[in-house]
Amino acid sequence: MTMGSIMSAPVGNSDSNTSCVTALSSYTGQPGTRKTLFTCTGIYDGRTVAIKRIQTKTFSLSKTIRQEVKQVRELDHPNLCKFIGGCVEVPNVAIVTEYCPKGSINDVLLNEEIPLNWGFRFSFATDIARGMSYLHQHRICHGRLKSLNCVLDDRWVCKITDYGLKMYRRDDGVEPLSTYQQRLLEVYMPPEFHNSNMEPSLAGDVFSYSIILLEIATRSDPVPAEESNLESAWCPPLPELISSKADSTCPCPADYVELIRRCRSHNPAHRPTFEQIKKFVHRINPIKISPVDMMMNLMEKYSKHLEVLVAERTQDLMHEKQRTDRLLYSMLPKQVADDLRQGKPLQAQSYVSATIFFSDIVGFTQLSSSSTPYQVVDFLNKLYTTFDDIIDNYDVYKVETIGDAYMVVSGVPRENGILHASEIASMALDLVGVCRTFRIPHKPNTQLQIRAGIHSGPVVAGVVGTKMPRYCLFGDTVNTASRMESTSLALKIQCSPSAFYLLEEIGGYLLQCRGMLQVKGKGDMVTYWLEGKKTSLVSNEHIGMETDVEKEQELYASIPGFWTTILS
Ligand SMILES: Nc1nc2c(ncn2[C@@H]2O[C@H](COP(=O)(O)OP(=O)(O)OP(=O)(O)O)[C@@H](O)[C@H]2O)c(=O)[nH]1
Ligand SMILES: [Mg+2]
């Protein structure tokens, strides 16, 4: 048994384990109605093949049949189902052909769940015309051309099946036809055959093709359900055909209808050949590419679109992340925020030396009582936004604002030697400086006054709580810094002795001893006013004062506690 030769193999049926069955629509069952029929399949040489059984009780392998087989074996066209072989043993006489898994175009056209644009429809019409043209070139009339004999392979290429082998199939169909089958036969039958037993003709196939064109356009069953005159029921006035049931409009209805009209000519001589049909369809078809290419193009477009979409979304995500990062980093030090995000345990950290700044608005309670809450919020927001902009210029970390109090630290969370004192001092001078020109939005004539204090010392910093975690400073240094502020005066910056010593060590600041001060919880303390910075532009008066201060500093530098007393 070789492929392409007549072979004697048992024909599979739907029950046998060598065959499989494909569900297809066809026309058995209730007379006059269309019913699902299955094609028989089997496995030959490792691939699925379609097996068409010939219902005959006798079969003899005549010379004519051998010639027919020889002829069809030589046919090779992409739009013809390849003949593979046959079985000649009664009762398993069969023809084995290439199997097309997507079923017939009849199944596809009548399945409303399959969307079919005109690209697909023209592709079917073109494929059938090509296959038929090839058959006719080999002088083979199909004789049973119909949508059920046009099957689709896995790439949606339409192939003609059940062609040729006229003698081989001669005894097929001895069983009586159902009403539906009878009516179907009549639908595809050219008018010249109606009252005679003519042999199949080339022009007859063209007529049958016109019915397929109608099915393609209307997606209707060629056999009308009701018992009506076939000719008028199946063939509504042509111009109405295209627009009626077509789910997308034909791009060239007039030409398409014209092609049907010509193929349906009553006079067979007026019908075009398939070679002419091929050219005509190609000319009127605006979508020249195959459905697979069409799908590939669509998929390419789709995947490009997806790529762009993914890039856009990634960018959006990046921006969103940057926004949340900015928000997070404005609430917690970066390192702490990163550790929190990674779920690392957070431990409080102690710092040997840091400088803390506190400021408070003088007369805030009175100001609030004579303003609306919105005015207060607006004012504080404006003031602290101004402050926030200024502190960006220094190596400081804003710890928090509590009502009208503003708290800043330097040397935490990033240590900076003793520079924390000068960073805070310069910043404090800037903040107090800006208050002199700051206008309270709803009280433009009231001078804004803040009180500020700074103190240096050891602190412990850490995050407390899991809900709304906050970075807090702990230790006596915080209390003392706060006392420096609360005992300070309007538009003044009061420094503790420790801050003072550090500033003196760093140099460049104008500091004036305030004198001895009773500090709650601390006892007596000598404090200093931070007046400004020593610059080459300061007045002579100031320079003279600095020089005095410097002289005295040098004198008592070795006795820190002492020299404050002398200055006072
Ligand atoms: N999926 C698939 N179905 C096929 C194939 N060949 C035929 N069929 C379908 O099998 C069913 C039965 O086919 P046939 O026994 O040839 O009957 P028919 O095509 O209606 O009638 P004739 O060809 O005129 O005898 C029809 O629905 C065909 O469309 C194929 O290769 N693949
Ligand atoms: Mg068939």
Image: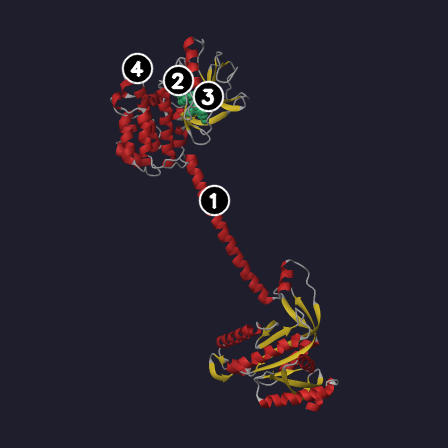
Q: Distance between the residues labelled 3 and 1?
A: 37 Å
Q: First in sequence: mark 1 or mark 2?
A: 2
Q: Can you tell which of label 1 and label 4 is closer to the viewer?
A: 1
Circles 3 and 1: CB atoms closer than 8 Å: no
Residue assigned mark 4? 198
Residue in view at x 63 percent, y 89 percent = 545
- Which residue type carries mark 4? Met
Q: First in sequence: mark 3 or mark 1?
A: 3
Seen from the viewer's position, the closer of residues 165 and 293 is 293
Residue assigned mark 2? 164
Seen from the viewer's position, the closer of residues 358 and 17 is 358
Residue in view at x 53 percent, y 57 percent = 318
Q: Is residue 229 visible?
A: no
Q: How far apart are marks 1 and 2 (CA)?
A: 45 Å
**Are there few (<14), some (14-19), or many (20+) residues within 10 Å of tag 4?**
few
Q: First in sequence: mark 3 or mark 4?
A: 3
For disc 3, does the CB lie below 8 Å from ligand 1?
yes
Q: Can you tell which of label 3 and label 4 is closer to the viewer?
A: 3
**Would residue 458 be found to the left or right of residue 273 on screen?**
right
Is disc 3 placed on a helix, strand or loop?
strand
Q: Can you tell which of label 1 and label 2 is closer to the viewer?
A: 1
Above or below, 233 relative to 443: above
**Would residue 238 be found to the left or right of residue 366 on screen?**
left
Is disc 2 placed on a helix, strand or loop?
loop
**Would residue 104 be found to the left or right of residue 327 on screen?**
left
Q: Can residue 124 be seen in this view?
A: yes
Is disc 4 placed on a helix, strand or loop?
loop
